[in-house]
Image (cartoon, rainbow, N blue to C red):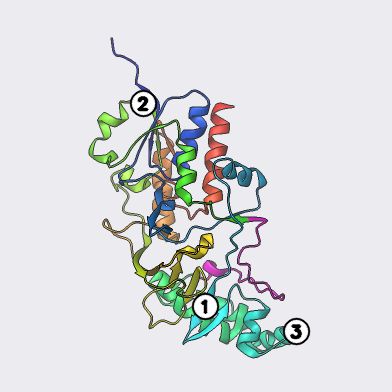
Amino acid sequence: MKSSPEYDYLIVGAGLYGAVFAHEATKRNKKCLVIDKRDHLGGNTYCEDINGINVHKYGAHIFHTNDKTIWDYVNSFVPFNRYTNSPLANFEGKLYNLPFNMNTFYQLWGTKTPEEAKAVLDQQTSKYQDINPSNLEEQALKLVGDDIYTKLIKGYTEKQWGRKTNELPAFIIKRLPLRFTYDNNYFNDAYQGIPIGGYNKLTEGLLENVECRTNVDFFKEKETLTSLAQQVVFTGKIDEYFDYCHGKLEYRSLDFKHEILETTNYQGNAVVNYTEAKIPYTRIIEHKHFEFGKQKTTVITKEYPLEASSEKEPYYPINDSKNTAIFKAYQDMAKKENTIFGGRLAEYKYYDMHQVIGAALSKTKKMFD
C-alpha cells in the first residue's frame, strides 16, 4: 500500500509569495517544505551583509502600502523604519528631484508658484494636444512636454526597456503624476519603510517554523520532489514549468555591479537615477541610506539593464500583446494542473512587495478559512 506524501505542500521558491504561503499554511498545522535553487532564502529581497551594511543584492526594495493590515502584518515579524523614498535624477551633471513636483519645476525653469509651473507645462504640451499617441514618446510629450521628456524620461526609459521610446507602446505611461507641491516623497502611500536590520529579518520571521532547503533545482528532481507533497505551490517561471511549449515569455533583466568605497557617504541619497542615454546604467543605489547607516565605508550598486536570458534573472515582464497571448496559453494549462501558481514569475506580472504579500494572504485565506 502506497504511503501518503510526507508534506501537505511543496513550495517552490522562497521569495515573498512562497514564504507567506508557507507561514500561513504552517500556522494552520499544514506541513510545508520550501525549496529554492539559490543558496539563500528570501528571493529578490535578500540582503547581503557587507561591512555591516545590508546590501539589497537584487536591487532596491522599498516597502510601501496603503493597506494597514499588510503593514501591521510585516511589522509583526520585524519593525520597519521611517525611510522615505526621495530619489534624484542626474542629467548631464545637474540634479533634479523626483517625482515631478514643484522642486523639479524650479530646477528646470525657475518657477516658484504652481501657477507659473502650470503655465510652462501648458505652453510645452499645447502643440501635442491633437495627437492620438501611438507610442510612448508621443504619450510623454502630450503629458509633460519637451523638457521633462528629454531630460528625465527619454534616456532612462530607453535604457530600461532596451528599445527606442517611439517603439514602445503608449500604455507604459498612461499617466505621469505631476505634483504642484514641494514634495519629494516618491510614494503617496500611508505606510513606507525598510525592515530594521534588513529584509532577511522578515524572511526569517515568516519561515521560522518551516523546513527549508536551498540549492535545490526543482526541474532537475521534479518527479521526486513532487511526490513528497500533496500539492505543489509554484512561484517560478510559468513558461519553464510547462517546458516552454508555447514559447518563452520575455523579460528585462538587470546586471548589478556592487562596489565597496572607502568613504562614509558617496552620494547623500539612497537612489540617484542617471537619465541620459550615454551613461549605461540607470541608477546608483547607496544602501546604507536605507537604514540611516553610520558605517565608515559605503556600498554602492550600479544597475545596468539588459535582456533577460537563461543566465540572467528575469525582473520586468514585457507585457506586450505577443507575450500576453503566450501567457494566456500557459494560464489555460495551469488551470488543469493540481498546482497553485503564485507570484510575479508564475503570474507574469510586475508586483510590488505589498501586492505579492496581499495575493498570498488572499490565497491562503480562501483555501483555509
Query: Which residue is at the front of the view, 293 or 9?
Result: 293
Secondary structure beneath label 2: strand
Q: In the rendered structure, which disc, 1 or 2, sits on the residue that comes first in sequence?
A: 1
Q: Residue at x 41, y 51 (%)?
A: 46
Q: Quadrant of residue 249?
A: bottom left
Q: Which residues are magenta?
A: 170-191
Quadrant of the image for the C terminus?
A: top right
Q: Position of residue 157 (x, y in %)?
A: 46, 74
The residue that mark 2 highlights is 229
Are the residues at dot 3 and dot 1 in contact (C-beta closer than 8 Å)? Answer: no
Residue that lies at the very extreme toward the front in this rendered image? 296
Whole-number angstrom distance, CA of label 1 to CA of label 2: 49 Å
Where 328 sits versus 206, above or below?
below
Predominant SS along the magenta part: loop
Q: Nearer the viewer, mark 3 or mark 2?
A: 3
Query: Which residue is at the front of the view, 217 or 185?
Result: 185
Mark 3 residue type: Thr
**Crowd tier of the residue under label 1, counting other residues whose Cα lies within 10 Å: few below 14, some 14–19, many 20 or above:** many
Left or right, 318 with respect to 214, comes to right
Q: Position of residue 185 (x, y in %)?
A: 63, 67
| Residue 135 visible | no
The residue that mark 1 highlights is 89
